[in-house]
Image: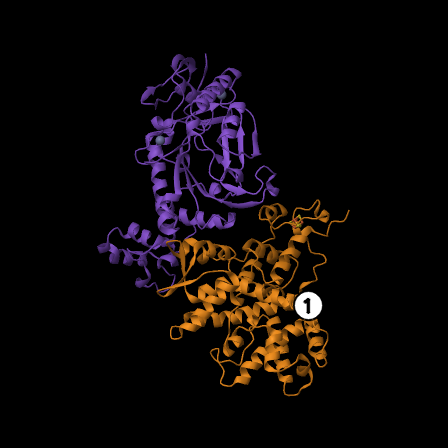
Amino acid sequence: MITLGKDEIAKYPFLADAGQYLKDKGFTLQQFGVDPDLKISLEKALNRVQVSADGKIYKSDLIDGEASKDYVLEREVFSFLLAIVLLKLTKMNTLIKRFALAEARRAEKYLEKDLANITDESKKELAVKIIDDLFSIQIKKQDDYFIIPISNYLKYSINFHEREWKLVNRHVGAGYVYLTPHETVRLIRKELSNYISSKIINAKMPSMILGFEEPVQKLILLSKKFATYTITTGEYPPCIKHAIEILEKGENLPHSGRFMLATFLLSRNQSIEQIAPLFKNAPDYNERVTLYQLNHLAGTSGSGTQYSCPSCEKLKTQNLCFAIPECDNIINPLQFGKRRK
Amino acid sequence: MQNKEIKFLEESFKKYYFDHFDLIHVPKRTSEREFGFQKFNSGMIRHISLKDDKELHLLLMQNTPSDVYCSNAYYSFPNQPMNEKDWKEADLIFDIDAKDLHLDCRQHHSVTKCNECNQISNTNNHCSKCNSTKIEIKSLPCKHCIDGSKKEVVKLLNILVDDLDVEKHNIEIYFSGNEGFHVYAYNSQFQELGSRERSELVDYIMFRGTIPETFGMKKLKPNRSLFPEFNEKGWRGRLSKEIFGSKSKRSKIISDLISDGYSNFQKRLENLSTSIGSQIDPNVTMDIHRIFRLPGSLNSKSGLSKVLCTDLQKFDPYSDSSFLNENTIEITANCPIEFKLKNKKFGPYYEEQTTVPTFAAVYMICKNLARIS
Ligand code: SF4
Ligand SMILES: [Zn+2]
Ligand SMILES: [Zn+2]
């Protein structure tokens, strides 16, 4: 187990043993629901979840991963631990996934900074150790780079579809890939968010705590909003449903899948503004690029041709087809549900 | 092929296996491998597991296979159906084949055999007699083809050792028994990689999927200092040697590259793939469930053996991998291309009767360019 200093727990709160941390500080969960001084942490926790649901990263009170006052650090950790309690009580998977991804991105920033730290060797060592302990990737420092075994690198890089992540576009030598601190942590974002979400999912289910009802209610409402805008998939064919599910889980949908989904929804007269948020959870989401690509597919920019949804046959070869009996007799996902016997 | 020919090939193959048990061994970790074989004119039998050399030799004697295969993968239960085998790991494996190199010499030693009327023609897409397009291309690779394949092997070896850190003593090179080479890499860090990861290694080795940025070229405001140096590791170093030639030309050439622009540089990279990348067969390396010709066994496309090359440069397949016997046999040959085996020249034959040693008869019959008289 990694031993963490005060400011490190604030940066990487998912490494802390929640129950133990509260006990050490002399608090119980119940106090946070009723004590007016502690309630601010609960509000912060609610905010932390809400922000993540929106696809953004929670803005912490830490400055460069440090705080002038101890209580600021503590509040930072409390809000994370309480956010988990709220998520457990809300029981909405979409919120958990979004929260985990946002928290992973947040931690990523600190990890990157710690890796690049040249004045404080111990900070760098901690980051290296976290990566090794959590994902068994052995990174070593060599000159200005971090080097990791090629086989380790490939395990993660194959999930990226940008060409720059291809091995051939990397500095490779003597069995290692050379990465900057930024690239190193980017490589494991997905694993980090999986780690955080599995931690939440495996956490013990608390019973309702006095004073927590209101934020939980708010979160349930919030998650309903998500449900309505994406899960109107009743009439959608399995290939499309599957693609949406992948995106909602914050997992990587290959380019061909994104193409299928976007062209399908555009043909169903969904607007670009309605479609774009679907891609928010993608590990490599970039709002500007997404809008640009959607406009391109819709024919509202560039060539002016609107792209059409690929045929079932094509999608089968791309492993995107998950045919069910209702798919019989159709040759394009757009026909799904339209032909009745 | 008719029964007469099959009988002759089976007898010759059987005699080879009987006389050369010393050349044919099961690979290490035998019980974790899947074996398979084929008989002349029949389908593949796979999912076999063997314990040792003895069991292998027995299989060879009982079945007189045309081809014998063994997995590069290791399984818990190699004789179970594929999804119950429990895949553990697989050696890295590469196939370099002269026919994939598209060398100019190829047309001079290829003929087509018509499946309808058996006519042998020099045309390459239809039969010169009946115009049928049901044809098979038969090639008798020349020295140039073999040298071309060797070059690709050397490129591969450099990448394996320098970039991928595979130790030299863990690499074995085999002549495939027909037109190319098989390279095995054991005990590397890549043993447990799946097919998608292996496909990334393939692109790396073949120098495919490159982007100009990797080599210092940018769309906007290119920066001279980002271009590769001579002594750099991996592809940057190799590319700089290739495009700059010498250190003294580097600066001038960088200026040229920048003025030629981004998309020309991109094209240049794509073209370089065949000259500096190693031309391996991507599907072979990516497939982690394949069974592969067993070292020491005969290749039914030629009657030559798959043999270990200890000195690649000196290796001559036409003398070093021909092990069939010298007993003579009368055949009717229709082999318009001259070839050399065991330092003896044969052909060209134009639908004529001739008496040749078994090894030469088998070679032509395997290529479908002769029959027993
Ligand atoms: S058959 Fe067509 S509509 Fe049905 S899942 Fe496959 S691709 Fe989608
Ligand atoms: Zn013909
Ligand atoms: Zn040739």
Considering the numbered disc 1 on the image, is that residue within a helix, a strand or a loop? loop
Is A43 in front, or is B338? Answer: A43
Residue B206, position in %: x, y?
Answer: 41, 46
Above or below for B355 versus B190:
above
Residue A205, position in %: x, y?
Answer: 69, 70
Tell how many labels.
1
* Residue B89 visible to the viewer: yes
Q: Colour of chain A?
A: orange
Q: In this view, does B56 lie to the left or right of A48?
A: left
Is A19 in front, or is A270? Answer: A19
Q: How crowded is mark 1: few (under 14 residues within 10 Å), some or many (20 or more)?
A: some
Is A298 in front, or is A21? Answer: A21
Is A130 in front, or is B221? Answer: A130
Above or below for B33 versus B358:
below
Q: Colour of chain B?
A: purple
Residue A143, position in %: x, y?
Answer: 35, 65
Identify which amino acid the numbered label 1 is placed on: Met
Which residue does the numbered mark 1 point to in the structure image?
A92
Query: Which residue: 69% across, 66% down?
Result: A227
Q: In this view, does A213 lie to the left or right of A125?
A: right
Residue B164, position in %: x, y?
Answer: 39, 50
- Looking at this view, name the residue that lies furthest to the left: B248
Picture quarter containing residue B80?
A: top right
Display coloring: by chain
* Residue B127 visible to the viewer: no
Picture quarter containing residue A80?
A: bottom right
- Looking at this view, name the residue that lies furthest to the bottom: A36
